Amino acid sequence: MARTQLLMDWAIEEFGKEYCPSYTTILSYAKNKMIYPPPQKAGRFWRVEKGARYIGISCQPVTRKNDDPRLLRILNDGQAS
């Protein structure tokens, strides 16, 4: 029996078919570690343990107005460019 399942299958079980967020939103949750234990990418697919739970954002970094704009961009959306 498999210990992990595909990310979207997990999301349907976690949120319900009617209220399940889109795949892009679920993927964002996975990349930003909003699911515990965090999903792992295996080949082309994201897989998550069957007992995993959605925890949301656990903490936000403190930023100031005089912080480097590159740092702020990375902290806000996780993109380098």
Image (cartoon, rainbow, N blue to C red):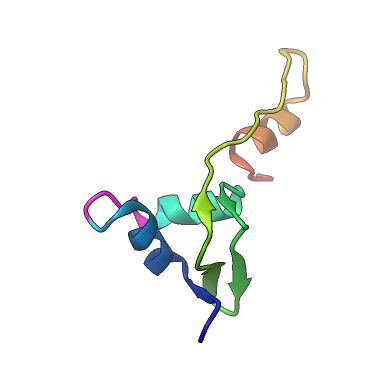
Question: Observer-nearest residue: 55 or 1?
Answer: 1
Inspect the magenta stretch and tell me whether residue 21 lies in it. Answer: yes
Q: Nearer the viewer, residue 71 or 30?
A: 30
Q: Residue at x 55, y 77 (%)?
A: 3
Q: Locate the C terminus and report the quarter of the image it occupies.
A: top right
Tell me: residue 64, above or below residue 8: above
Residue at 26 percent across and 49 percent down: it is 19
Residue 67 on the magenta segment = no
Q: Quadrant of residue 59?
A: top right
Q: Residue at x 55, y 68 (%)?
A: 49
Q: Main secondary structure of the magenta part?
A: loop
Position above or below: 6 against 29: below
Q: Position of residue 67 (x, y in %)?
A: 77, 20
| Number of marks drawn | 0
Residue 21: horizontal and vertical position, in percent?
A: 34, 50
**Left or right: residue 76 compared with residue 45:** right
The x, y position of residue 37, in whole percent, is 62, 57
Horizontal arrangement in the rendering, residue 50 relative to residue 70 (left or right) = left
Q: Is residue 12 above or below residue 63?
A: below
Q: Which residues are magenta?
A: 18-22
